[in-house]
Image (spheres, rainbow, N blue to C red):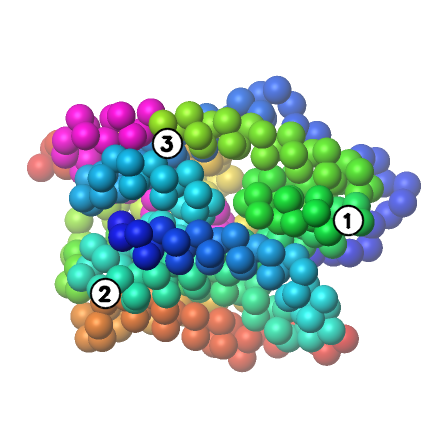
Amino acid sequence: MDESADPDEVAGPRLSKADFATMGITFFSLGVTLQVLLIDAGTSTTRAFVASAVIFSATSEFAYLAVRDSGGSDWAAIAAGWIVATRFGILAVSLSQKLPQGNIRRAAAAVNAFDPNVAVAVQQSNPAAVEREFWRTTAGMMIGWFLGIGVGTFLGPVVGDTSRIGLDAVFPAALLAIIGNMLRKKDGAIAGAAGGLICLTLLPVVPAGLPIILSVFGVAIALLLVRQPAT
Amino acid sequence: MTTLAIIMLTVAAWGQRLAGAFLVGPLLERRPVLSRAANLIPAAVVMAVIVQLTIANGRTLVLDERLAGLAVAALLVWRKAPFIVVVLAAAATTALLRSAT
């Protein structure tokens, strides 16, 4: 992230009504899919709704499901969910530095930090605009998300075979789109490739869940291969 | 999903955001290497989750229609297609190939 904000710079991109709708539709469809897949994996409807309403991290729910699905223990699955949630910690770091002062408003924004709303917010030129655009984007996402998990909870028990309509391909694609920008940078691409390879190699040989946890060492490989000038 | 998992994942998602905003942010500012490492974790680990979801079935490696869906998604992400297009194209590709076989 470039910290050198030019004071004369025009205000960052504001969310148009179309962007707002796209955001809502995107999170709506993710919410529906996640619920249907959770219920398909044997979670009760109430439990699936509560989980997606409070966890605030579809990626963690997915990492958890991926590990459980491959036969991993509850704790291994939880550990995988914890590691992928570091992404949100990092998003909160970049967001909170640009928000207006005040612990409560920073905390409230931090727990709602997701990729799209932080991406829109951090491009604004002053703290007040950062906060305003952050909450506008968040509103679009949240409306879509809660409607989506509501609809998905009802659809879950009636969809039947989720793989027939390709639902199992939705989350890998969504995750790839989320990290797409990181993979465009050299060190991000190496970290991603290394993480994927570590998982692929270890999958048949170590207990389920461990390949995802150990893929974090892909970061070390990227740091060793791509040196940045010391500042 | 167990109750323990729901509680622990909620703590993970909320706790790490709060920790990021109030504890880690100031620390990372003083340690650029840590900051770089932290920024690279999602690329590595999310890619591993993608591998697990796409080319594995339990602990066996399986090549099937999911990989074709991901390939289409990768192409669209690279061409900077809108998120919703990426997701729908991946699902449609996988579903169509399955119905054809």
Q: Which residue lies at the image location 20% right of the left edge and 55% below the top edge? A: A69
Q: Is residue B2 left or right of residue B28?
A: left
Q: Which residues are magenta?
A: A151-180
Q: Is residue A91 left or right of residue A7?
A: left
Q: Are marks 2 and 3 on the same chain?
A: yes
Which chain is disc 2 placed on? A
Q: Which residue lies at the image location 71% right of the left edge and 44% below the top edge? A: A105
Which mark's residue is nearer the viewer, 1 or 2? 1
Residue A116 place in picture, x, y as percent: 57, 40
- Residue designated by label 1: A102
* SS at mark 2 in the image: loop
Work out how far the residue at label 1 is from the one at label 2, CA to CA, in angstroms. Answer: 41 Å
Mark 1 vs 3, N-terminal side: 1
Q: Quadrant of residue A20?
A: top right
Q: Amino acid at mark 3?
A: Ile
Indicate whether residue A166 is drawn in magenta.
Answer: yes
Q: Residues within 10 Å of mark 2 (few under 14, many from 20)?
A: some
Q: Which mark is residue A127?
A: none
Compared with A162, A41 (above or below) is below
Q: Nearer the viewer, residue B67 or B18?
A: B18
Compared with B65, A73 (above or below) is below
Residue A164 place in picture, x, y as percent: 16, 33
- Residue designated by label 3: A149
- Residue designated by label 2: A73
